[in-house]
Amino acid sequence: MSLTLVDSTPRENGNAARAIYENRIAFLDYLRVVACFMVMAIHSAEPFYLGGKAPDVTAIASRRDMFWITLTECLCRVAVPLFVMASAYLLFPVRRPAGEFFKRRLLRVAVPFAAWAAAYVAAAHGRFGQLLFNFPDEGGHLWFVPMLLGLYLLMPLLSPWAERVSERELRGWIGLWLFTTTFPFLRRLWEMQFGEPPFGAVPYLYGECPWNMFGAFHYVSGFAGYMLLGFWFRKFAAERNWNNTLTNAIPLWIVGVAIVGIPFFFYANKFPFAAPYAHAVRMEMSIEYCSLGVALTTIGVFMAMRKLNFGGAFHERIIRPVSEASYGMYLLHMFILAPASAALIPRLSTPIAILATASATFALSAAAAILIRKVPFIGKWIC
């Protein structure tokens, strides 16, 4: 991801991108920094419902804990979609030859990913052979990188269409994608009406079945929708004043938070709650990254963050260096978060523990990634 998702150089998108990059887009730096902290806050809250000492169990101690977990998810679940939108805002459509684009992206994203994936496997004495097939179990947060690389594979293919698409047509495709963000809820509705499918399968929709997972809406769903949203904001969304921005962003955010938080909060009806790990997957229906509530809150937050185009010393000395190191922060932060969480959770109340763990992890990860990037020759290949 960059969580520096992209370079800050004007090379990917020709003349239009050069015009954008002549004056660095400060709001994307602020966005990356905020979203990076959000990722760490989400991971800091997970021990309070993903079992703690029993990693194969969904366990929530109290309704109070459930409230703080839900609040964290409502505020922070937008993090990953924001990174995807930031990447698309800068990289899509692609005007370089596909081979050159892939080379730049793979070197920037895949090489550090491979290095840190191996580090997590080595630290846990895991199976290196798994890296030939997927991200390692020991670094579950690394799921994001293969997804991002998949979007990079898609960008050159869609770029000729993006160059000539009208706003009305693009809105139509985004609307279709928003329909697919209701699928987590439609699957649950299917279960309520007809019962759970056999063998633990999720309910199939619109052509999906045990021998075909590529249903009618497969190719217009998923994180590609956030790629289209980032592109729409850059190409068609006019700058608005704060009053107009908030008039549109706040209702989207409120509705989105309600869709995210209410089903999540009321999933458990008695406490302490304990169930097999699979219940966590069911509980997270409304907070899936490509679900309707998360999509709406992401749009609202991106609209507001777009107004933070402030330069100056604070941006140059603090925000920009952290933004540029954010990909490395994401890759390495679990090495810091795990011991920080173990040290702080027993000593602090739930909300303070979540905030303190996230803050400590963010600060130490930023320092580590910035220092690593300064190592001659290899630093920027690692972070």
Image (tube, grey):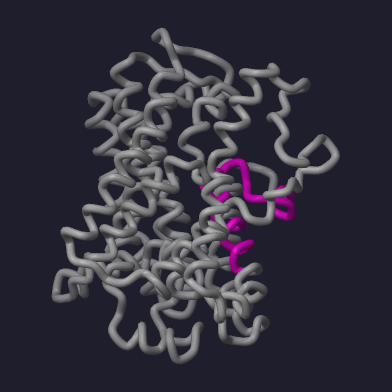
- 66 or 359, which is in the foreground? 66
Residue 138 falls inside the magenta stretch: yes
Viewed as shown, does residue 267 lie left or right of 124?
A: left
Total label count?
A: 0
Magenta stretch: give its range. Answer: 129-152
The residue lying at 74 percent from left, 50 percent from top is 129
Q: What is the chief secondary structure element of the magenta stretch?
A: helix
- 35 or 309, which is in the foreground? 309
For residue 66, say whether it is visible.
Answer: yes
x then y, percent, for residue 93:
54, 77
- 45 or 307, which is in the foreground? 307
Asked if residue 260 is positioned above or below residue 92 in the image, the reply reads above
Asked if residue 345 is positioned above or below residue 103 in the image, the reply reads above
The residue lying at 62 percent from left, 80 percent from top is 160
Asked if residue 165 is positioned above or below residue 356 in the image, the reply reads below
The residue positioned farthest toward the left in the image shown:
313
Q: Quadrant of the C terminus?
A: bottom left
Viewed as shown, does residue 247 lie left or right of 69?
A: left
For residue 115, say whether it is visible.
Answer: no
Q: Quadrant of residue 332?
A: bottom left
The residue positioned farthest toward the front in the image shown:
168
x then y, percent, for residue 256:
37, 40
Asked if residue 196 is positioned above or below residue 247 in the image, the reply reads above
x then y, percent, for residue 65:
32, 21
Q: Quadrant of residue 83?
A: bottom left
Residue 97 falls inside the magenta stretch: no
The residue lying at 54 percent from left, 20 percent from top is 57
The residue lying at 39 percent from left, 9 percent from top is 271
The residue positioned farthest toward the right in the image shown:
211
Viewed as shown, does residue 381 lie left or right of 234?
A: right
